[in-house]
């Protein structure tokens, strides 16, 4: 898959650069999906240690009534152009069963930011094909509390063609809480909306 190979090349290059430790932190994210199709709630809980070991638990992400557990380690560098790359692997259990591989990438330059989550799930069910997912965001932090930008979802399930869903986003930040709002396919009749409620706890600030 050409797109997945492209991201792996980025990952290999970044991991050759400086590695730094960050503060330990944990948090949860909960997203409510509604619009063209059935509505769903997608919660996520994660933890990152002071030595940058990372773990996460998600529900309804790969498929409904499905749990995914991933773990990995973050590699990062802080400068004018800061970045972090977290390769992960794990398992998927429920209506969809398989083995996960993926990468989370974050980049910041002044008030500009970019992030992407890439995932490829190898299905162990004969009735299902492998699953490829990406969720990317590019935005601008207008104030300490308000940001806005663009988002993109790409989904490939089995032998089906890629599903591209471009969107717009905005969010409000307040004391560790973030409230993002997304609208995908804004100029079509099959719009989808995602509302998030996210919270992060930084251990060294507590």
Image (spheres, rainbow, N blue to C red):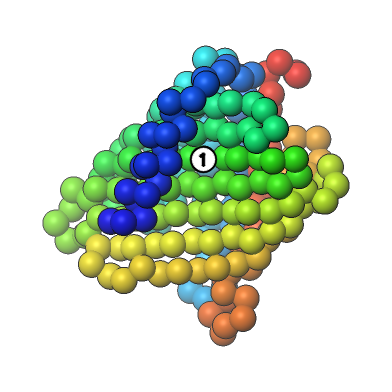
Residue furthest to the right: 143
Percent coordinates x, y for residue 2 in the rendering: 31, 56
Percent coordinates x, y for residue 101 in the rendering: 33, 40
Q: Residue at x 61, y 20 (%)?
A: 22
Query: Residue 172, can we see it?
Result: no
Q: Is residue 30 above or below residue 163?
A: above
Which residue occupies the foreground of this view, 179 or 118? 118
Secondary structure under tag 1 reads strand
Mark 1 crowdedness (10 Å alpha carbons): few <14, some 14-19, many ≥20:
many
Taking the image as shown, residue 100 lies to the left or right of residue 46, namely: left
Q: Which quadrant of the structure image shows residue 72?
A: top left
Q: Residue at x 28, y 56 (%)?
A: 1
- Assign the C terminus to one quadrant of the image: top right
- Number of labels in the image equals 1
Q: Is residue 134 above or below residue 18?
A: below
Which residue occupies the foreground of this view, 111 or 88? 111
Q: Which residue is mark 1?
A: 105
Q: Which quadrant of the structure image shows residue 169?
A: bottom right
Taking the image as shown, residue 187 lies to the left or right of residue 89, namely: right
Taking the image as shown, residue 159 lies to the left or right of residue 2, namely: left
Query: Residue 61, can we see it?
Result: yes
Percent coordinates x, y for residue 100 in the rendering: 32, 42
């Amino acid at each position: 898959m050409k797109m997945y190979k492209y991201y792996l090349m980025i990952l290999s290059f970044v991991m050759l650069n400086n590695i730094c430790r960050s503060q330990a932190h944990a948090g949860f994210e909960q997203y409510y999906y509604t619009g063209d199709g059935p509505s769903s709630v997608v919660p996520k809980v994660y933890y990152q240690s002071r030595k940058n070991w990372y773990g996460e638990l998600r529900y309804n992400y790969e498929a409904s009534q499905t749990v995914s557990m991933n773990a990995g380690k973050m590699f990062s560098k802080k400068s004018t152009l800061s970045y972090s790359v977290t390769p992960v692997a794990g398992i998927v259990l429920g209506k969809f069963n398989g083995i996960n591989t993926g990468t989370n990438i974050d980049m910041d330059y002044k008030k500009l930011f970019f992030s992407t989550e890439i995932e490829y799930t190898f299905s162990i069910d004969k009735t299902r094909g492998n699953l490829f997912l990406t969720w990317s965001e590019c935005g601008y932090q207008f104030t300490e509390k308000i940001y806005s930008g663009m988002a993109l979802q790409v989904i490939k399930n089995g032998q089906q063609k890629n599903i591209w869903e471009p969107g717009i986003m905005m969010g409000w930040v307040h004391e560790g809480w973030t409230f993002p709002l997304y609208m995908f396919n804004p100029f079509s009749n099959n719009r989808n909306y995602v509302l998030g409620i996210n919270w992060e706890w930084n251990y060294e600030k507590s």
